[in-house]
Amino acid sequence: MAEETFYRELGLVNTRDMFEKAMSGGYAIPAYNFNNLEQLQAIVQACAETASPVIIQVSKGARNYANATMLRYMAMGAVRMAREMGSEIPISLHLDHGDSFELCQSCIESGFSSVMIDGSHLPYDENVALTRRVVEYAHAHDVTVEGELGVLAGIEDEVVAEHSTYTKPEEVEDFVSKTGVDSLAISIGTSHGAYKFKVAPGEEPPALRFDILSEVEKRIPGFPIVLHGASSVVPAYVELINRYGGNLEGAVGVSEEQLRRAASSAVCKINIDSDGRLAMTAKVREYLANNPKDFDPRKYLGAGRQELIDLISHKNRNVVGSADRLA
Ligand code: 13P
């Protein structure tokens, strides 16, 4: 029997039911990172309007940036905002890349309904032991846990990995059964950030390792898989940023076609952070460049927020397939 379930009073839910439905429906739940008001407003509005379940997620760095107490009430406000829009979408508040038991515990006590413990950089046995410890505490409070096997390259806040290591399918069964995790993040060729692949101009980025994904699926059938580093790095945003004073050379992401293919498989959660950052930055830069006399943050942040609403609606409808999934 669960001990106190801290997140319930905020109106949040854990990811169990969401993933079950996503698995049987052949789509994925979008997990959007946020750290400020406008990003969260955009996520809620777009997901309520497209009737999409959603995971709102924060990294350790984002939690420090927003302030842990402020964040708790922002999540509560997100649920209330959706309900006042007449929407019953389930919302889960998730810790992205938790790096210690203590951080996961603190997040659970302040109202997170889902946590990731990322021990993927540790030796296998240490990853198992750390993940198991978090699962025991989390499950006692009805919080779901995401673990990770295999390392993604790239930069995610202060977490930097130079090289990626693909997930070893032969480890997944043992890891899942020893730890008791509810979902598993795997490494099949994506990376964090806007510079995912090095390609010559006009060249296509390499395909994701769907062979590893299907090998994983065979070993743990029906188990929810998570795909990190899933931004498409929309070329139109990169171009706008560069046109208005930015310098993002060689930024390339994962194609929407590959993401759709992943979403229709055992991948139940798709993580998107960089695309949201790019959309906001592009529109803020454009607005400020075209309106040099304006200094009201509502104007330029409002322009960024509207673009983020449009981007998230598009992803829900056309990429992860989570729109109109409330039945
Ligand atoms: P992107 O940098 O591709 O958006 O990935 C975000 C992510 O995986 C967060 O954990």
Image (cartoon, rainbow, N blue to C red):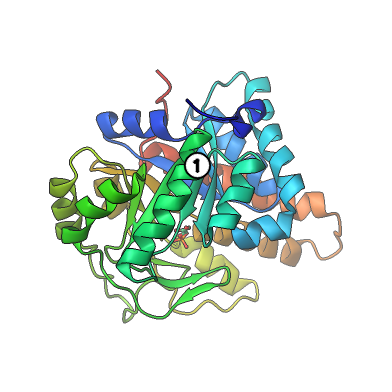
Please indicate whether residue 234 sits to the left or right of residue 86 in the image. left
Residue type at mark 1?
Ala
Q: Nearer the viewer, residue 47 or 118?
A: 118
Q: Can residue 112 be seen in this view?
A: yes
Please indicate whether residue 27 sits to the left or right of residue 83 in the image. left
Q: Can residue 190 be seen in this view?
A: no
Counting labels gives: 1
Name the quadrant containing residue 284: bottom right
Q: Nearer the viewer, residue 74 or 6?
A: 6
Name the quadrant containing residue 317: top left
Q: Which of 248 and 221 is in front in this view?
A: 221
Identify which residue is drawn at 41% across, 81% down. Answer: 162
| Residue 194: x %, y % from top left | 47, 69
Helix, strand or loop under label 1: helix
Please indicate whether residue 111 sits to the left or right of residue 192 in the image. right
Instruction: Establish if 164 lies above or below 255.
Output: below
Q: Which of 148 and 237 is in front in this view?
A: 148
| Residue 49: x %, y % from top left | 54, 29
| Residue 214: x %, y % from top left | 15, 51
Name the quadrant containing residue 122: bottom left
| Residue 315: x %, y % from top left | 43, 44
Please indicate whether residue 81 sits to the left or right of residue 237 in the image. right
Dot 1 alpha-carbon crowd within 10 angstroms: few under 14, some 14 to 19, many 20 or more: many
* Mark 1, residue position: 138
Identify which residue is drawn at 61% across, 18% down. Answer: 86
Quarter containing the C terminus: top left
Identify which residue is drawn at 47% across, 50% down. Answer: 134
Identify which residue is drawn at 38% across, 53% down. Answer: 147
